[in-house]
Amino acid sequence: MDSASGPEHLDSGQLRKVPGEPRNRTPDGEIYEDPRILRAELDRFFYRNWLCIGRLEELRETGDFLTREIGRESVLVVRDELGSIRGYYNLCRHRGTRVVSESTGRGARSFICPYHAWSYDLGGRLIGAPHMADQKDFRRQEYGLHPVRVADWGGFLWVNLEPSGPGLADSLGPFFQRFNRFPIADLRLGGRQTYEVEANWKIIVENFYECYHCAPVHPRLNRLTPYQSGHNDASFIDGSTRSMFSGGYMEFAQDFQSMTRSGYTTRPFVPGMTAEDKRRVYYYVLFPNTFFSPHPDYLMIHRSWPSSTSHTRIENEFYFTPQAIADPRFDPSDAMSLWDEINRQDWAVCELAQRGMASRAWKGGRYSDREELVRDFDRFVAEEHSRPDFHRISGSSVE
């Protein structure tokens, strides 16, 4: 696999020609294969947009923390002594060493670099620096952890590595308003599945956007929500309007009521569900990497994290009402096992696509009339590639 780390200059003209003609034709293979393009996409898409990284319930008490790998970066998020959520680059200000190796932790009082024992409090301030007291012009207050912007919505944690720019509500407020009728913050994690997929992150997004493949690839899904029941109601590009989310919904066949192996459920519906909502499963992409999918009786989230041109880590989480989880009979396996089957079917064809697009013969194809959102996503990415500053693959400055 090609590493996703390290800056490299890429001529903007190269990038402009890579996506092909996304209004009519699919991109050629280079957009999924060139490590220089991935580095630019990480910098432009993943380091400068709001990313969902976890859940507030993971940081309930002072000193509870989590770390997140985002491309070549590592982020540390912690609840401080005042109860606030803080975010930092996970690197020591002495020699750049990763300070925290654990993915999660409870009750930390400080963070100590394993290399030379520089230490930081929960507010990111440098509180210990052995053998630095006599260094000329060294001011401890100037060497705290680099901050990262953190926000929350619906009980979810979001980070943005760009020091300035639109806030979370400015970027995704119109999407959040669509689902304010649901008490998403009250839902609780009922299960998580993680996958390592040998495919480019864009192939995974494209796959999520269409059910053209559902009849041959997902017979069980297609029985519950037939592929022709899909309706798109939001696009990244709508005339001159651009947004940071896109997607739509599918409708249940017959009297099915849930995406479970049987198609039925005894769990309570998520509060706020209308009669219309109870007949639908919603599927949205929050650019660049969060798939947000409200179901009648649970919320499903996917997050994709690229580590190379041909490798993506996928987290799949399931959230249920407190009432459902409190029931002694609570068992999420009817939903999770179905989606595990569907996910693995998807990852298998995504990996086949990744390998096929590496062929010297592949120069792009044509979109079907069932791939409107795929086309719009590819166009959105192509327009970002064409921006004059896209080829500047140096990391954003931090303060």
Image: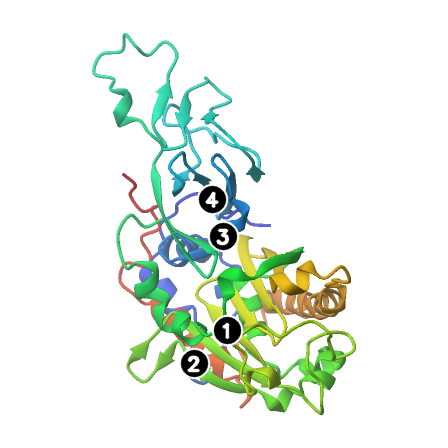
Per the model, the C-alpha gap separating discs 3 and 1 is 17 Å
Quadrant that contains the C terminus: top left
Is 20 displayed left or right of 334 in the figure?
left
Are dots 4 and 1 in contact, CB under 8 Å?
Answer: no
The residue closer to the viewer here, 96 or 13, is 96
Kind of residue at badge 4: Arg
Which residue shows up at 64% across the image and 64% down it?
A: 323
Point out residue 127 in the picture as x, y percentages from the top left corner. Answer: 36, 21
Choose the circle earlier in sequence order: 4 or 3.
3
The answer for how far apart the CA atoms under marks 2 and 4 are is: 31 Å
Residue annotated with mark 2: 234
Question: Which residue occupies 33% across, 56% down?
Answer: 391
- State the CA–CA distance, disc 3 to disc 2: 23 Å
Inspect this view and state whether residue 362 appears: no
As measured in the structure, the alpha-carbon distance from the residue carrying label 4 to the one carrying label 1 is 26 Å
- Per the image, the residue denoted by label 1 is 284
Amino acid type shown at disc 3? Ile
Q: Nearer the viewer, mark 4 or mark 1?
A: 1
Q: Which mark is residue 321?
A: none
Tell me whether the residue at label 1 lies in contact with that at label 2, contact meaning CB atoms closer than 8 angstroms: yes
* Amino acid type assigned to the residue bearing label 1 in the image: Tyr
Location of mark 4 (residue): 72
Q: Helix, strand, or loop for circle 4?
A: loop
Residue displayed at 35% across by 50% down:
393
Query: Which residue is at the front of the view, 351 or 305?
Result: 305
Name the amino acid type tagged 2: Ala
Identify the mark nearer the N-term, 2 or 4. Answer: 4
User: From what the image shows, is residue 380 above or below residue 394?
Assistant: below
Q: x%, y% of residue 228?
A: 62, 91
Q: Residues within 10 Å of mark 1 (few under 14, many from 20)?
A: many
Residue under the image location 43 percent in, 81 percent down: 234
Q: Which mark is residue 53?
A: 3
